[in-house]
Image (spheres, rainbow, N blue to C red):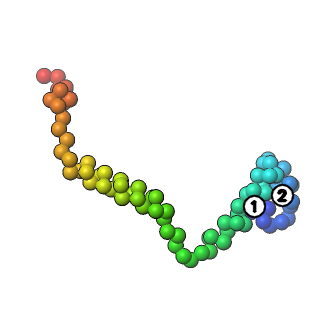
Amino acid sequence: MEALKGVETVSQLASRFDVHPTMAHQWKRALLGGASGVFERSRRKAPEGDEKRGKDLHAKIGKLAVVPIFWPESSKPWTGK
């Protein structure tokens, strides 16, 4: 944010905040490049990969909820009797 104000040069800010000037320039460019996205009204659609993965996980949960689980007699907790 300080770099956007323009009061000090990026080199001065990098020195003051103990970062490399290249990193400060990259942060400034990233902020300027992504700032317009803050004001967009349209909602971004989730990537299809995430939607497919979610459906796969819901299907797996459904299978696990329906499939009965049988434990062998030897896996019961020891009661000490």
Rendered location of residue 65, percent (x, y): 24, 50
Residue at image location 46% in from the left, 62% down from the top:
48
Numbered tag placed on residue 28 in the rendering:
1
Q: Quadrant of residue 26?
A: bottom right
Rendered location of residue 49, percent (x, y): 46, 58
> Which residue is at a point 71% across and 61% down the rendered structure image?
30
Observer able to see residue 17: no
Instruction: Using the image as rendered, state which of residue 81 and residue 27 is in the foreground.
Output: 27
Dot 1 amino acid type: Lys
The residue carrying pointer 1 sits among few (fewer than 14), some (14 to 19) or many (20 or more) residues within 10 Å by Cα, namely: some
Q: Position of residue 60 (x, y in %)?
A: 31, 51
Along the line of sight, which residue is nearer the eye, 30 or 1? 30
User: Which residue is label 2 attached to?
Assistant: 10
Label 2 CA crowd tier, 10 Å (few <14, some 14–19, many 20+): many
Query: Is residue 26 found left or right of 34 in the rendered image?
Result: right
Q: Which quadrant of the rendered structure holds the N terminus?
A: bottom right
Outermost residue, bottom side: 41
Along the line of sight, which residue is nearer the eye, 7 or 45? 45
At mark 2, the secondary structure is helix
Check if mark 2's residue and mark 1's residue have beta carbons within 8 Å: yes
Q: How many marks?
A: 2
Q: Is residue 73 above or below residue 53?
A: above
- What is the residue that sits farthest to the top in this orientation? 81
| Residue 81 visible somewhere in the drawing | yes
Secondary-structure class at tag 1: helix
Label 2 vs label 1: CA separation?
9 Å
**What amino acid is at disc 2?**
Val
Q: What residue is at 18 percent from the left and 35 percent from the top?
A: 71
Percent position of residue 78, x then y: 19, 26
Left or right of 62, for residue 4: right
Instruction: Please determine whether, in this image, residue 78 is positioned above or below residue 7.
Output: above
What residue is shown at x 49% (from left), y 68% (from top)? 45
